Image (spheres, rainbow, N blue to C red):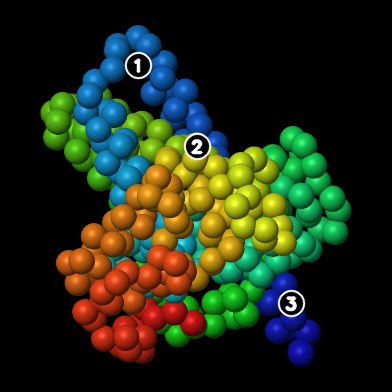
Amino acid sequence: MPARATRATVAATLKIKIVQQLHAGAILAIPTIGVVVAVALLVRDGVDPWHVAIAAILYSLTILGITVGFHRLLSHGSFQAGPLISGMFVIFGSMAAQGPALYWACNHRRHHQCTERAGDPHSPHVHEGRKLSGWRGFLHAHIGWSFTADMTNTAVFGKDLLRNRSLARINRLYYLWVALGLAIPMALGALVEHSAHGALMGFLWGGCVRLALSYHGINGINSVTHSWGSRPFPTHEQSRNNVWMALPTFGEGWHNNHHAYPGSAIFGFKWWQVDLGAWTLVALERCGLVWNLSRPHFLEPAVESSRPADRSSTPWGPP
Ligand SMILES: [Zn+2]
Ligand SMILES: [Zn+2]
């Protein structure tokens, strides 16, 4: 390779690493500061129901975006949907500010391919050939990994996703979706209170509090559910089922189930294993808006989906 091309590649890689680390710092620091201010104002002025409502609604939509859009659809191709429904989930996922859809899905595919081994981007048990344990492992899996500037090769892990033009467009506009996720609650707050104070409260609750909760919820899947919980399936790593993580993450906490059956769109296998992501998908399936939901054989419904089983019929199909 000519020296100039090599220099350009090195410079481009360095730029991506710097952006990645700035992003990791911003998504940790800004919502944390916002939460401190929101709690201080709450102690001083009391709670206003619309603050909680706006945080809860935006949290639910963006967590669904992560678990249904980024995880079950893009990372695992565990169901199919048309471009409108797929695009909607991926845009909601982008609003969680956990990185562009492609970056998230490729990191996650690498996690499945290298679980608890060299190459796993966020294991609490191993990093760069060194064994981790205790709080060091926990902090690496929860926060530290995003600062390592360890890059996942999208050409290797996301070949199928790179071919999807609609996804590429949404991916390119990542910062717009993050900004919208902050602008929408600010605008709603200004409308509710007819004041700048309302916009500020919308930013704090619908933006910062919501982002902090989804950050710790989803990173808790890397740290908590690879450390504490039950292991009904004897997988060759440390994934766990943890009800306290499953409830706020809309089903992600049934992580041992997921590692045992990664292609399944359903994570909660028992009736009591609450999986709001799967329940949303089953409801959409009944309306004909998603189809070909993958399930383990023991969860197959008696009546098949009415949609054709042609996986190539959608541009959002699995690899
Ligand atoms: Zn895992
Ligand atoms: Zn997965």
Q: Amino acid at mark 1?
A: Leu
Q: Amino acid at mark 2?
A: Trp
Name the residue carrying label 2. Answer: 244
Quarter assignment of residue 122: bottom right
Q: Is residue 281 left or right of residue 272?
A: left
Callout 2 secondary element: helix
Q: Residue at x 64, y 40 (%)?
A: 228
Q: Is residue 278 left or right of residue 240?
A: left
- The crowding category of the residue bearing disc 3, from other C-alpha atoms within 10 Å (few below 14, some 14 to 19, many at least 20), is few
Which label's residue is closer to the chain start, 2 or 1?
1
Q: Quadrant of the N terminus?
A: bottom right
Give the alpha-carbon distance from disc 1 to disc 3, as whole Å: 52 Å
Quarter assignment of residue 153: bottom right
Q: Residue at x 15, y 26 (%)?
A: 193
- The crowding category of the residue bearing disc 2, from other C-alpha atoms within 10 Å (few below 14, some 14 to 19, many at least 20), is few
Name the residue carrying label 3. Answer: 7
Front label number (2 vs 1)? 2
Name the residue carrying label 1. Answer: 42
- The crowding category of the residue bearing disc 1, from other C-alpha atoms within 10 Å (few below 14, some 14 to 19, many at least 20), is few
Work out whether 291 lies above or below 14.
Answer: below
Closer-to-camera residue (39/3): 39
Tell me, yes or no, whether the two marked residues, 1 and 3, touch with CB atoms within 8 Å: no
Tell me, yes or no, whether the two marked residues, 2 and 3, touch with CB atoms within 8 Å: no
Q: Position of residue 9 (x, y in %)?
A: 69, 77
Q: Position of residue 267 (x, y in %)?
A: 46, 57
User: Could you tell me if residue 74 is visible in this image?
Assistant: no
